[in-house]
Image (cartoon, rainbow, N blue to C red):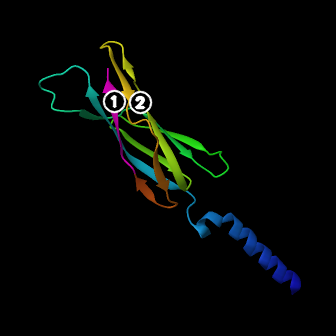
Amino acid sequence: MQRAVVGWLLTISLSSCAAGPAIFGPSTGMLTGHVTVRACGGAYRPEQSGCAERPLAAGTLTFRLSVTNGSGSEKTATTDANGVYSITLPPGTYAVTVTPGITHQASTGIGAVVGDAAPRRVTVVAGRTVTSNFTYTLQLM
């Protein structure tokens, strides 16, 4: 009888280990959104009413998870042609930086510098989808 109870308890504990994430819930969250760029400055054009805003295609978003001991993990996502990104991350608060896909166009002589270089922060929650949109300003030279 005692062997049967021990075998039963062992079976239950091993099966619950395999189903751990299902029992305790999801261990990751989804982060999605759009990245747009505002192009400001450069030569004055009468038809230009302000800073033009466009989706950032082929931009790289870097998500850096900060932890208390000073080391953290880092993951990246790339925007599509419409500036849309999506990434699955473990829960936590991330510093987000964006690197444009193109920072200089030699054919037009237009250079750009990201004006909003400070990282933004987003919090990822397990089992949820968080939408976070970013707009960065480029100062044309």
- Nearest to the observer: residue 122 or residue 128: 122
The answer to whether 5 appears left or right of 127 in the picture is right
The answer to whether 139 appears left or right of 63 in the picture is left
Taking the view exactly as shown, the residue that stands out farthest to the bottom is 1
The answer to whether 38 appears left or right of 62 in the picture is left
Return the residue at label 1: 138
Return the residue at label 2: 100
Residue 77 position within the rendered picture, expressed as x and y whole percent measured from the top left: 48, 39
- Give the residue drawn at x 38%, y 19%: 104
Taking the view exactly as shown, the residue that stands out farthest to the left is 46
* Type of the residue with mark 2: Pro
Q: Look at the numbered disc 2 and give the secondary structure of its residue.
A: loop
- Nearest to the observer: residue 53 or residue 50: 50
Bounds of the magenta segment: 132-141
* Magenta-drawn stretch, dominant element (helix, strand or loop): strand
- Give the residue drawn at x 41%, y 37%: 79
138 magenta-colored: yes
38 magenta-colored: no
